[in-house]
Image: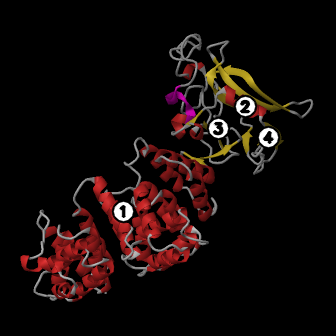
Amino acid sequence: MKQLIRHRITILALLLALAPLSLPSCAPAPDVVDIIHESDNSQLVAAVEDVNKSLCERMSLLEAALESGLADSQTMLALVQKAVESLRGDMEEKLAALSEAVRSQGAGLETKLALIEAAMNSGFADEAAQQALLAEAIASMGGTLEEKISALETVMNKQGTALETKLGLVEAAVKEGLADNAAAQELLKEAIASLGSTLESQMAAIDSALVSRQADLSAKLLLIETAVQEGFAGAKTQQELILQALDSLGGSRADLLSEIDSVLVGETVSLLSKLDLMETALTAGFTSDVTALQQLQTLVTALKGKVDGMDRKIDGILATLGTFDASTGSVAAALSDIRTAVSGLSTDGEKLAAIERTLILLTGIVDGHAFVDMGNGLLWATCNVGAKQACDTGYFFAWGETAPKTDYSWDTYFDSNDNGNTFEKYAIDKKTVLEPKDDAACANWGGSWRTPTIEEWQWLKEHTQWEWKENYIRPGIHGFLLTSTVPGYESQRIFLPRCGSRMGENAESKWLGLYWGSSLKMSSSNWAMVAVMHVANDSNSIIFDVASGSSRCYGFPVRPVSDYLMK
């Protein structure tokens, strides 16, 4: 069956490709034009069933009869069905006749829709062939954009055409660039409203369209989106309607996944509907967590190059998605959180930023490293530069240097050649704050990571509770556990191991927790700001000092911060 379908599609595509650029006129022959002036339509019926006339000619005759009032819409539909059923020849010849009639200028859009619908009913066209014919019908429309939209609106209000056929037409209009998502929803709103005055009749038609094979998944989602927004869905939720559409899909699981991917990379439906589709497919068992994450990557990747200035953000989202695993949490919940975050936003840039923020908060990873938000949006790394986990010391750095070494003295310091008396780059009367290339956090971790300012250390001091911890995580690891006191963030904490320092070639001050700030101490150019934590010997209380400074050539660890979510 699939081979036959592919064969038909190939034939139709070939016919359309070989068709001349000028559209056929197919005007009624002179000897049959007078039929439309007869008092009854018997001769019209005979002419429509006349197999010696081309389908194109018969459609033009029906169009003239429709315009003159000799045939109403219902009669026209019945006669179109007769004309299609009377077609002779093999499948290739029938498809050629259908293609010529749909592209002709002698028939209007309503007549062409009736023709396509009749072809589907007679088994001469499958779903893919129908979409190709609808695209040709859209392409053959003349007039201005306003006139084309007006013609579409007229067809939407006709009661004789099935909703699924109208749905296919709207989707073709979107794909051909004739209507955007908002215009498509307006057209479908009119189409649903034309189905009858009762909600029951409208819902019945919607149900029929959702289970029909005449519309693909993108078109059905567009219908669902419109029905829910305009109140045509009754008590059914958007997820229930999506489940109906998914249940109607035939073929293998690979076919279903391919259809979903087509929706995700297409532009027919909104981002919200795409997220609803992925969440519904996952919770209903059509997809797995792994597949859902891959689909989210497909959705985000499809936006590359389409949103000005957002490719870097898209790359960041994809990198964050790569860190999502079973330990991160529920994928379905993540999709729901993302949908909530983007709901109500208007621009693609805003939506991408919301997606990124949501994923970063869910994974706890930004630019490749784990973080904790202590309550003000600034992200504190969970470990030092050079460490693999919170309890590790990591590397020691002289202030403004980006690599560890064995000798931390003025003799090896990058910014002075005279034992710290004068400085080439950083001094009170020169630069006082580290540039990214001289920042150990930025140079080693990249992205948005940097060394904290002393003001950020001050905020941390003022908004946390401090605890001294011995043998933390494993024996021999001592340090300071800082727990946020910001309402709503009381579960957030970071551990700062007591690392001491490096002076010359020696390890010193092992009882202290010493961490660099990003600026010089303004009283002396050879000192830089340091956050110091230690336990007082007399009271066993913790002293947290952020106003201290130390010689720039000494080696201290760096605890990075990121303001990625604050920009």
How far apart, in angstroms, are the residues tagged by discs 4 and 3?
A: 15 Å
First of labels 3, 2 by sequence position: 3
The quadrant where residue 500 appears: top right
Is residue 31 covered in magenta?
no
Quick check: marks 3 and 2 in contact, CB under 8 Å? yes
Please give the range of residues in magenta. Answer: 435-441
Question: Pointer 3: what residue?
Answer: 378
Q: On residue 485, which mark appears?
A: 4
Q: Which residue is drawn at 50% across and 64% down?
A: 225
Please state, as top left, top right, bottom left or bottom right, where the C terminus lies in the image.
Answer: top right
How far apart are the two marked residues, 1 and 4, measured between alpha carbons?
A: 59 Å
Determine whether 403 is above or below 66 in the image: above
Q: Which amino acid does label 4 sit on?
A: Thr
Q: Around disc 1, counting alpha carbons within 10 Å, would you say few (fewer than 14), some (14 to 19), or many (20 or more)?
A: some
Does residue 439 show up magenta in the picture?
A: yes
Q: Mark 2 points at which residue?
A: 459
Looking at the rendered structure, the secondary structure element under dot 2 is helix
Task: Confirm whether residue 175 shows in the render.
Answer: no
Secondary structure at numbered mark 4: loop
- Alpha-carbon distance for marks 4 and 2? 11 Å
What is the total number of numbered labels drawn onto the structure image?
4
Query: Which residue is identified by label 1?
Result: 153
Q: What residue type is labelled 2?
A: Trp
